[in-house]
Amino acid sequence: MDSCPWNGFEQATISFCEQRLCSWVVEPANTWSNIGFVLVGLFILWKEFRSQRPDLVMVGITAVIVGINSSLFHATGARWGEIVDVSAMYFISSLFIVLSVKRIWNLSSTTMISWYVTLASCTSAAMVLLGSNGIILFGLHITAAVLLEGYFYRISTHTAKFVNLAFMALCFGISFTAWKLDISKVICDPNNHVFGGHALWHFGNALCLWFYYRYQTQFNKGLT
């Protein structure tokens, strides 16, 4: 009888450098490193507890969701874990899209939240129906988000500050490089279960969400 806890489940379509163990946590480094998302998210939610800023609260909630869902994937290595992990990535990209649209066309809070949930949910459903690992769909989301931010940059007044967005872009570039080197096994120690390239990707993206939160704080102090 197979004693590995998660081997009875369909395995994920994507794997990273860290070798999976026969354990309840198959990728320890890639699992624990999601603590960055959770800490960033909880700190944002603590700061915005009484702020009446649903856009900022959404950033905090999204960070926590990403941390939990990504942990489920890397702890199990199962296809269902992969689905909830990539779905959380869609919540990040949907957040970027919807908050850009909010700033450009002044959506109400109710509409903003509805669009956010609908976009993330529909894209997750498309990933499942297509049987893909979801990376291409995520790339399309990010492309749309970048184009919308570019448009907002063109139409924004001189009072808008983009330094935190620039820090976020730089951080994402470094993080994505680590992700690529890890998944392609260019820089890879499969027996390192403490910290690797994909763990760096997690911490880098948690920091990206912090910079995005700081960028978003300057807009719409009184959302309707």
Image (tube, rainbow, N blue to C red):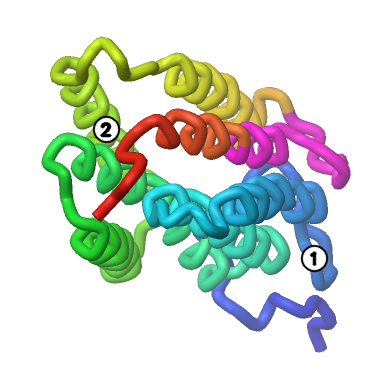
Please identify, in this view, whether the residue under mark 2 or under mark 1 is nearer the observer: 2
Q: Position of residue 16 (x, y in %)?
A: 64, 44
Q: Is residue 201 left or right of residue 57?
A: right
Q: Identify which residue is drawn at 34% across, 68% down.
A: 128
Q: Which residue is mark 1?
A: 25
Residue at 12%, 41% in the rendered image: 105
Around disc 1, counting alpha carbons within 10 Å, would you say few (fewer than 14), some (14 to 19), or many (20 or more)? many
When asked about the image quadrant of residue 65, the answer is bottom right
Q: Secondary structure under badge 1?
A: loop
Please, which residue is most extreme toward the bottom here? 1
Residue 65, placed above or below residue 56: below
Q: Which residue is mark 2?
A: 143
Q: Quadrant of residue 148?
A: top left
User: Residue at the spot x=29%, y=62% of the render?
Assistant: 113
Q: Nearer the viewer, residue 85 or 58?
A: 58
Q: Position of residue 74 (x, y in %)?
A: 67, 58
On the question of residue 130 being in view, the answer is no
The amino acid type found where label 2 is placed reads: Thr
Left or right placement of residue 9 versus residue 131 in this view: right
Q: Which residues are magenta?
A: 188-206
Q: Is residue 21 toward the left or the right of residue 88 in the image?
A: right
- Badge 2: residue crowd in 10 Å (few <14, some 14–19, many ≥20): some
* Front in this rendered view, residue 193 or 59: 59
User: Residue 101 colored magenta?
Assistant: no
- Give coordinates of residue 76: x percent, y percent: 68, 68
> Eyeballing the image, is 205 above or below 76?
above
Q: Is residue 201 visible?
A: yes
- The reply to whether the magenta stretch includes residue 189 is yes
- Residue 164's spot in the image, x, y percent? 48, 21
In the rendered structure, which disc, 2 or 1, sits on the residue that comes first in sequence? 1
Is residue 161 shown left or right of residue 4?
left
Q: Amino acid at mark 1?
A: Val
